[in-house]
């Protein structure tokens, strides 16, 4: 009997934990959506509670106030869930970093960040807007930019180990390119200009390879991918990629 009671307690505890996480996930999702749609300053805790189907008090107990909600929604958008595992420590990231070929590495990385930016771009823009009106949001925005810049530096460090970058680029200049082609670029091209995510990923892959790798890698990429540019007035012209 004692053993059965212990099993029951563990089961009930596990069930309560799952229910609490489900509530927390709903609150985070509601906050992120409303911040992106309405703006940080215009969104109230009451609206977040109503959208999540919980009480105002539950918003605070499950996640926290608006600054905590904004940060958590941003963090979840980056990695895709609420688990306490950073992006570099996740299996997909580790597999990408293990890729020895620099062209393939950049293609895999472009695929990873395209998927990420699909989640991240709306809340990224919300944090950017909030930074102008709220000091907590401003601190979060600056921290977010710094983390993204460090991630770009890590990409370039990986490339250096895998064979090097263009000889006319410094490590800082190369990292600036990766940093620039971030969630804001996705927002402008996909959300504002109507590109498909697939088109963005293809463009990002080609841009990374063309801008970061030595010329011989770019030439190899064009041959291996089957893209043979036609020539107009003696100049190579790529056919426009499909969307």
Image (tube, grey):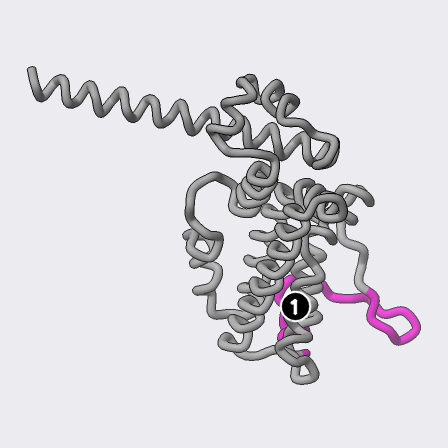
Instruction: Give the percent coordinates (x, y) of residue 152.
Output: 60, 65
Span shown in magenta: 215-237
Residue 229, compared with residue 92, is above or below; it is below
Q: Residue at x 68, y 48 (%)?
A: 135
**Which residue is identified by label 1?**
209
Q: Quadrant of residue 46 in the image?
A: top right
Locate the N terminus by quadrant. top left
Nearer to the camera, 42 or 159: 42
Q: Quadrant of residue 168 in the image?
A: bottom right
Nearer to the camera, 79 or 189: 79
Q: Quadrant of residue 56 in the image?
A: top right
Residue 5 vs residue 56: left or right?
Answer: left
Q: Residue at x 43, y 64 (%)?
A: 98
Observer able to see residue 122: yes
Instruction: Give the percent coordinates (x, y) of residue 25.
Output: 50, 30
Residue 209 among those drawn in magenta: no
């Amino acid at each position: 009997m004692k053993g059965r009671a212990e099993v029951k307690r563990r089961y009930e505890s596990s069930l309560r934990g799952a229910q609490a996480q489900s509530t927390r996930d709903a609150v985070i999702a509601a906050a992120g959506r409303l911040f992106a749609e309405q703006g940080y300053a215009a969104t109230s805790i009451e609206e977040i509670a109503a959208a999540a189907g919980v009480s105002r008090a539950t918003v605070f107990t499950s996640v926290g106030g608006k600054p905590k909600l904004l940060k958590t929604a941003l963090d979840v958008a980056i990695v895709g869930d609420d688990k306490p595992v950073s992006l570099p420590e996740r299996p997909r990231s580790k597999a990408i970093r293990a890729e020895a070929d620099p062209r393939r590495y950049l293609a895999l990385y472009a695929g990873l960040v395209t998927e990420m930016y699909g989640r991240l771009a709306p809340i990224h823009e919300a944090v950017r807007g909030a930074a102008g009106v709220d000091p907590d949001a401003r601190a979060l925005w600056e921290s977010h930019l710094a983390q993204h810049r460090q991630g770009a530096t890590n990409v370039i460090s990986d490339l250096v180990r895998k064979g090097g970058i263009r000889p006319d680029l410094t490590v800082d200049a190369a990292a600036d390119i990766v940093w620039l082609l971030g969630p804001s670029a996705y927002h402008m091209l996909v959300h504002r200009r109507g590109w498909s995510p697939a088109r963005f990923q293809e463009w990002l892959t080609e841009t990374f390879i063309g801008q970061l790798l030595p010329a011989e890698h770019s030439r190899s990429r064009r041959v291996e991918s089957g893209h043979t540019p036609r020539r107009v007035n003696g100049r190579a012209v790529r056919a426009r990629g499909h969307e």
